Image (spheres, rainbow, N blue to C red):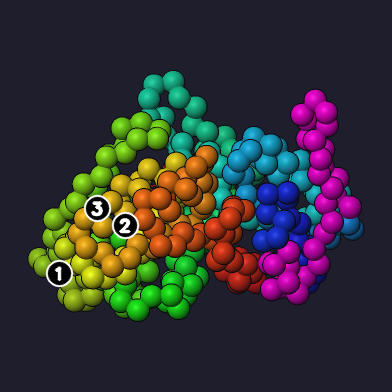
Amino acid sequence: MIILIIGGSASQKLAANVAKELGETLCPLETKKFPDGERYVRIKGEVEKNVTVIQSTGFPQDENLIELLFILRTLKDLGAEHIKVVVPYLGYGRQELRFKDGEAISAQLVANLIEESGADEFISINLHEDSVRDFFTIPTANLSAMPPIAEYLAGKVENPIIIAPDKGALDFAEEIAEILGCNCTYMSKIRLGPDKVETRIVDVQCDFDSEDLDKVKKDSKVNIDSVAGKEAIIIDDIIATGGTIVNAIGILKEHGAKSVDVCCVHPVLVNDAVLKIMAAGARDLSSTDTLTSDVSCISLAKLIADALR
Ligand code: R5P
């Protein structure tokens, strides 16, 4: 079965690498912006029945999203019968609820638009909220980037401890700690505003009363004092302004970490986030290539290709 791979303008290299992994054809695509700002899309290859479209919808979110919708509808018009849509980073994915009266549930509309425009399957990576999948009626998958991230980190550290900068990232930290066979810990974070967070240390209590003895034995969570003399690795799904990470680096340094490396799945990296993180004392900053950035050195092409096989 021939599968045509199309990379939108936000995910060109990743799409090319996925096509290479799969040994499938990469379809040429012309995209441009008219002088008035409107988007233009032209699929330049022969459309197959089975097509995979890869396009992240990060900044500029609206343009990348509309481009994705144009691609999907055009593919259907030109005879595609089954379209798998891979959106490695889903813009608007963080507004899956009406947190305040009257707010738009942006993630729901985005999901509806992708499906209505022609998607037959939807794949993303570490969605900020897995519940976003419930907005689709087509099959969906939410892949974890933790195995490739752990593989990248394994070659770089000798005596690591994995740090979740907030409770939401603890699952990621535990997944990586388990793969690397080391401990992890987490911090507690309160968001005071879009670019302001407060971070505190947590007294980690292992659930020794749990009836799941395997879990108790495997529990890798330790208190923050355990970072002393260790190579701390902070892991998060998204780095946006960098405020969360800067706070965590400060706490780790105060508690005697030998070094602090930072890694995330989605490098949103607003404004001077990279500088802020490096100036706070990070030894290394790395991320996957769900979004293109200076630090996107961990390719998820194989992870995506394996999910598409
Ligand atoms: C929030 O829950 C996410 O996991 C990240 O911690 C957050 O998006 C990071 O934002 P910032 O870099 O602006 O602190």
Q: CA distance from mark 1 to mark 2?
A: 25 Å
Picture disc at residue 211 = 1
Q: In 3D space, how far apart are the residues under numbered discs 1 and 3 (Cα atoms)? A: 33 Å
Q: Which quadrant of the figure shows ligand 1?
A: top left
- Kindly state the secondary structure of the residue where label 2 is placed: strand
Q: Decide which of tag 1 and tag 2 comes sooner along the chain.
A: 2
Residue located beneath label 3 in the image: 251
Of callouts 2 and 3, the N-terminal one: 2
Quadrant of residue 50 within the rendered picture: bottom right
Residue at 59% in and 44% down: 58
Dot 3 crowding, Cα within 10 Å, few <14, some 14–19, many 20+ = some
Nearest the eye: 22 or 230: 230
Q: Which residue is mark 2?
A: 164
Q: On the picture, is 87 further left or further right than 106?
A: right
Q: Residues within 10 Å of mark 1 (few under 14, many from 20)?
A: few
How many numbered marks have been drawn onto this rendered protein structure? 3
Q: Position of residue 15 (x, y in %)?
A: 70, 61
